[in-house]
Amino acid sequence: MTPDPKISRQREHQANERTFLAWLRTSISLIGFGFAIARFGLFLDQLSLAVATEEAPRSPLISSEALGLCLVIFGIVVIAIAALRYADVYRQIERASYHQNRSMIFLISGIMILLGLLSIPLLL
């Protein structure tokens, strides 16, 4: 008794869709964190102005607003990459020629490591 190829292909498509939705949730989280970090930086600026008499020196490149903006932009890029990857895997499943590609995993991991390293000066 061999498994029905239609059911097997349907499961593959459902797995592809679940993977896409996981990437979508990740990108929404990145956008949300970016927005929160940027707004929290503005809150801290207002708080320091209310408490201190003079404004603290800031670097325009290393700020919570810049990091937040980078996270929002990166979240949007992840949505686009995930959608393209979903369509590519869909075509491969239909042609029965799926080839695993881990480059997106390494690219996104590398960018997140870079953004994490850039946030260290904000914590110090």
Image (tube, helix red, strand yellow):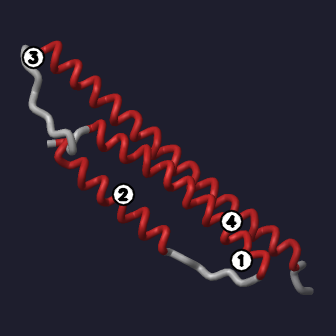
Q: In which quarter of the view is residue 5 placed?
A: bottom right
- SS at mark 4? helix
The 10 Å Cα crowd at callout 2, few under 14, some 14 to 19, many 20 or more, is some
Q: Is residue 31 left or right of residue 70?
A: right
Q: Which mark is residue 92?
A: 1
Residue 86, x across and y down, in percent: 65, 64
> From the viewer's perspective, is residue 104 above or below residue 115?
below
Tell me where residue 120 appears, x and y as whole percent.
Answer: 20, 49
Q: CA distance from mark 3 to mark 4?
A: 54 Å
* Labels 3 and 2: the sequence-earlier one: 3
- The amino acid marked with disc number 1 is Gln
Q: What residue is pinned by disc 3?
A: 52
- Residue at the spot of label 4: 87
Give the mark nearest the N terminus, 4 or 2: 4
Q: Quadrant of the N terminus?
A: bottom right
Q: Residues within 10 Å of mark 4 (few under 14, many from 20)?
A: some
In this picture, residue 30 sits left or right of residue 25:
left
Q: Position of residue 64 (x, y in %)?
A: 27, 38
86 relative to 79 in the view: left or right: right
Q: Earlier in the sequence, mark 2 or mark 1?
A: 1
Q: Are marks 1 and 4 in contact (CB under 8 Å)?
A: no
Q: Decide which of 34, 19 is in the foreground and name it.
A: 34
- Mark 4 belongs to which amino acid? Ala
The earlier-in-sequence mark between 1 and 3 is 3
